[in-house]
Each structure stands twice: as C-alpha cells, then as structure tokens.
Amino acid sequence: MATAPSRDRRERTLIIVCEFTGKKYRQRLTPSARQAKGAVRAIREQEHLADGASPDSNRSARETGGDEGFPSQISAEAAECRELAISAGANVLDVIVQRRDHPDPATLVGKGKLEEIAAQAKASRTDLIVFEQNLSPSQLRELEHALPCRVIDRTQLILDIFASHARTREGQLQVELAQLEYMLPRLAGRGRSMSQLGGGIGTRGPGETQIETDRRKIGRKIQVIRTRLEAVRDIRRQQRQRRSSVPVPTVALVGYTNAGKSTLFNALTQAGQLESPRLFATLDPKLRLITLPSRRRILLSDTVGFIRALPPTLVKAFRATLEEVQTAEVLIHVMDASSASLDVHRQEVEKILRDLEVDKKPRIEVMNKVDLLPEEERTGKNGAIAVSARAKTGMNALLAALDTALESDPLEDREMIVPQSEGGVLAALDAGAVILGRTFQGEDAHLRVRAPASLLGKYRKYWQGRMDVLRGMEVWR
C-alpha cells in the first residue's frame, strides 16, 4: 500500500472519476441518485457563471457528448471524493472525468485517457493521483507504471483519513488492521515500493522471496492486532454488562459523514467534541450521560460517520466500535437537510444499517442544519424532526421524541405517601422523577409522580392506588 500523504505540505493532487454509461451501469442509478447528480450539476454551473466563467469553461473537469442521464459537470461522487482528499490534507488541482461505456480491465480509464492524465500530471507537477473508484491490484500496478506519481484509490484515501484522525489506541489498532488487510493482496502490485522481480521464467529470485517474507510478516501482525482487538471487545462486553445491571438505555447517533452528528452530540451533552466540516473528523466513539425531560437518564453515543461504499475492511476492523450501534435501544439518524444528495445519503445509511442487522431498531430521523435552508423549508418531512445543532434549536422536540421511543424502563405514574422524615426518598424522587403534584398532610407528603419503573420499584412500599398500563403510558382510574 502507498505510504500516507505527507503532513508537512499539502500534496498537489489530481482526482480521476469514471462515469460508466453502459446500460447495466445506468440501471444502477436510482431516481434519487439521478436527481442528486442533476442538483450538483446545476449548483456547479451557477457557481461558474457567478465567477464570470462561461458554461464551457473548466473543460478538464468534464467530458463532452454522451448520455443525457449523466451530468456533464462534476458529479456528486466526484464532489465527495474531492472533499475526502481535502480532509486528507491534499491540494486538489483538478477533477478529471472519464466517461465510457464500460471500465477498462487493465487501467479502468483506457489507453488514450491514461496518456492524457499522465501528460497533465507531469505538466502540473502532481504529487498524487486519486481514483474515485476502487482499483484492483493489477489495475493499480498498470497505473503506477504509466503515471509519473503515486496512485491511490478511494479505499486507500479513506484509510489515510482514518489513520490521521484515530486518537485512541483502539482506533489506531482498528485502522492498522484495515490497512494491513487491504495491503496484503496488493503486495505483488507494489513494484516501486517493494522492489521485487517480475514473475515468469528467469525472473525469480530475492524479490519474489521478499514478497513471501512480507506476506508472512503482515499475516502475523494481522493476527496480533486481531487478538488485541478481541481483548478490546471483551472489555467493552464487560462494560455493557455492568451498564445493563443499572437500567440506563443507550441511544446511538448514526448518519452520513459530515451530517452534523458531533455538533448535535455537543448540543445535547455539552461534551466539547471536535466539530469540523471535514469528512470523518470524528472517529473514536464517545459516550455521555444525559437526562431526558422525564428525568430518565440515557447514554448517548456518537459513532463514526458512514459513507457510500464503506470499505469492507473498515467495516470488519471497526466491529468493536459499531457494536455500540448494535446494542443501542434507539438510533437517531442524523441527516444534512441542506445537502443536495440527501436522498442518496439516506439510502446509503439504510444499506449499512441493514448490513449491521440493526435496521429494525426503533429510529428517530433528524433533519439537521435547517438553519441553512430558506425560512419556509425549515420543517421536518415524513415525520423527521427539524433541528439546528449549531443554533441549538429543536432540541426539546428531539428529547421528547426520545422519551416516547424508549421502551425499556417505561415511565409510570404513581401516587405515593412518603413520611417527611424519609429525606433520602424524597430527594431521590425529586432528582429522578417528575413531580406532578405535592401536598402535605400531617407528617406525610402525598405525591403524584411520573418516573421510570426501575426507580419507583425501589420505593414500592410507599405506593398508593392502582394503575393500568396502555402502550407504555400510565392511565389513572
């Protein structure tokens, strides 16, 4: 695998995007994906016109002719790859789009386009070329031979961002495992970095032996990291068991990267989590205790953001982190209401949740960043809650929805008679329950309270009256 980009300076980078117009590739685009592509095209054209550029300017970022179902201007996928490169610290010089019916098996882009990319990379003194599509080992080898600088694909770019953002030892181990698993089948293709001899008669020698040695070293290292991560899983399992002894439900924030999950997490918990417009700014999960309007307490978890075609190596490596999503009672799906690719991002998150087998869990949809929309559009759609995490609006509606969605440790309404001498009991009820009514008769306090069943169960001897339960809500007789 190519070495991580230098952090001393911003590497001069070209991004290559292939749009395949063959029938089977066109059919993969959903109507919402086509709509998102069209929206991005319109925005880009408006930006160019506002800058005084003609509609035909910036020819290197598009291709002429072809199917009208594909935008001539930079697509949503290309824009996302550009943001990924910027998040990795790159200085993006240009986005080159190649449009063809089918991918070239050897180089993905074809011979003619490859020569054009090589000429532009040489003329612009490019340090790095990033392919938006994932490359096979053979394609990576051919491209490295033909191009004058380092070549990486989308997965390697995401892995580099994860490596730069991992802060905890667990996160660093997870990233290292994903990098090694990605590198292992590509050793034979790393001609420049591994210096091995080619295959075939008369070419075997120390280079070929070196590859096998490297494979064994990487294989052993992978086993060591897996063992360490398994120990992390055991520790997390023990922590969850301890948490389960005290009924504090967990709620997980999920969503597409850069949807504003960390900002929302800070708005709800005042945790001071890093907030950044860069993709994957938050990598290591965070847990904070918050109190709902009903006085119930929950653990809110901020998780790593999802992205289109999340590399399988990352999904496997971050299994310990994603278990927080799998064990959560309720998921809060945070979406960027201002994004032109909102529907596409929603579908990608749904797909990953299905892969994690958590798509059946209770879920609250949140439209974040509504402050970036026109006033008349700042409302939730299809039952989603409209919020602005930065402006801290809509928080009360979200917390009330959480109260309704939680099924474990349901709320109960009780009448209680507590002697005023039981100061500890009265203090506990004041802290953990909503006092609906309070009167004093003699030395007793007569209370009407709404509180979690676990809290009221501790003080069963003070109950008075009977109640019926209907759908988790208490109805007085």
Image: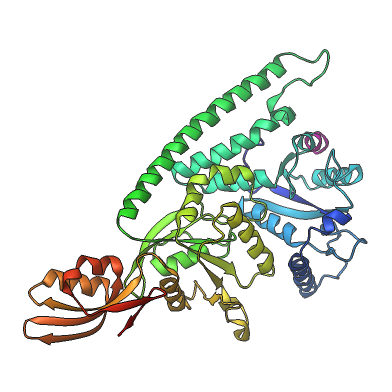
Q: Hey, which quadrant is residue 250 in on the image?
A: bottom left
419, 125: nearer the viewer: 419
- Total numbered labels placed on residues in the image: 0
Residue 320 screen position, x and y as percent: 48, 45
Q: Is residue 179 left or right of residue 190?
A: left
Tell me if residue 469 comes above or below residue 249 in the rendering: below
Residue 53 screen position, x and y as percent: 82, 70
Residue ID at (50%, 65%): 362
The coloring applied to the image is rainbow
Residue 423 in view (yes/no): yes
Residue ID at (65%, 69%): 339
Location of the N terminus (image quadrant): top right
Q: Hey, which quadrant is residue 70 in on the image?
A: bottom right
Residue 169 screen position, x and y as percent: 44, 41
The answer to if 144 sits in the magenta stretch is yes
Tell me if residue 137 comes above or below residue 267 in the rendering: above
Tell me if residue 260 comes above or below residue 438 in the rendering: above
397, 77: nearer the viewer: 397
Tell me if residue 28 comes above or below residue 267 in the rendering: above
Q: Hey, which quadrant is residue 293 in on the image?
A: bottom left
Residue ID at (67%, 36%): 2
Q: Main secondary structure of the magenta part?
A: helix
Q: Is residue 310 left or right of residue 56?
A: left
Q: Is residue 441 left or right of residue 275?
A: left
Give the magenta-colored segment's residue range.
142-147
The answer to if 148 sits in the magenta stretch is no
Residue 276 screen position, x and y as percent: 53, 61
Residue 8 in view (yes/no): no
Location of the C terminus (image quadrant): bottom left
